[in-house]
Image (cartoon, rainbow, N blue to C red):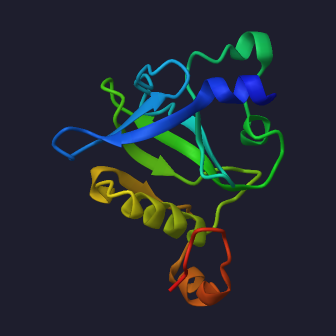
């Protein structure tokens, strides 16, 4: 994606009126992110500037080919990537960390969780789905004090 294409997929998150859901809208159009099919969630990227990008089913894969996480941020480093699940009201109900290229670690999930808490989002409003490869050992082996991402404190 070039900057213009990426901007069309940038979303912002807001809590629902009763704070039981987290609503995603496209920043340029203010339109709700459309519902995803449970077996075909939308692709997401969370870049180093803490911007979220969602590529939904409107992506013309026949014309442009299958979209990959690296395309969204033009191969640049990112905080996380994976799939996100949406209801018809634009609410995100689940997020996972399945990106074959970026392979987010358990610390990426922890940073996203803390980022949402810092914005007073209801972090229990969605399902947090880890990677099959993650285990308790990952938590023990992660150098939590060594995580240095701007704006995050690993304490």
Residue 32 appears anywhere in the view: yes
Which residue lies at the image location 53% right of the left edge and 77% below the top edge? 135
Left or right for 57, reference 71? left
Left or right for 77, reference 32? right
Which residue lies at the image location 34% right of the left edge and 50% below the top edge? 126
Q: As displayed, is residue 45 above or below residue 151?
A: above
Q: Nearer the viewer, residue 83 or 91?
A: 91
**Residue 1 placed where, x, y %?**
79, 29
**Residue 32 placed where, x, y %?**
41, 23
Q: Quadrant of residue 63?
A: top right
**Residue 36 placed where, x, y %?**
44, 27
Q: Nearer the viewer, residue 112 or 50?
A: 50
Q: Nearer the viewer, residue 105 or 116?
A: 116
Q: Quadrant of residue 83?
A: top right
Which residue lies at the image location 66% right of the left edge and 70% below the top edge? 149
**Residue 73 placed where, x, y %?**
76, 41
């Amino acid at each position: 994606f070039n900057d213009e294409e990426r901007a069309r997929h940038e979303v912002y998150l807001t809590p629902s009126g009763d704070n039981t859901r987290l609503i995603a809208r496209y920043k340029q159009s203010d339109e709700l992110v459309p519902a995803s099919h449970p077996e075909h969630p939308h692709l997401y990227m969370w870049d180093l500037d803490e911007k979220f990008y969602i590529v939904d089913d409107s992506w013309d894969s026949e014309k442009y080919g299958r979209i990959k996480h690296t395309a969204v941020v033009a191969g640049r480093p990112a905080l996380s990537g994976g799939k996100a699940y949406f209801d018809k009201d634009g609410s995100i109900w689940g997020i996972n960390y399945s990106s074959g290229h970026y392979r987010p670690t358990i610390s990426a999930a922890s940073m996203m969780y803390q980022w949402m808490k810092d914005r007073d989002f209801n972090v229990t409003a969605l399902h947090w789905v880890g990677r099959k490869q993650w285990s308790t050992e990952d938590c023990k082996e992660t150098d939590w004090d060594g995580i240095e991402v701007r704006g995050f404190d690993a304490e």
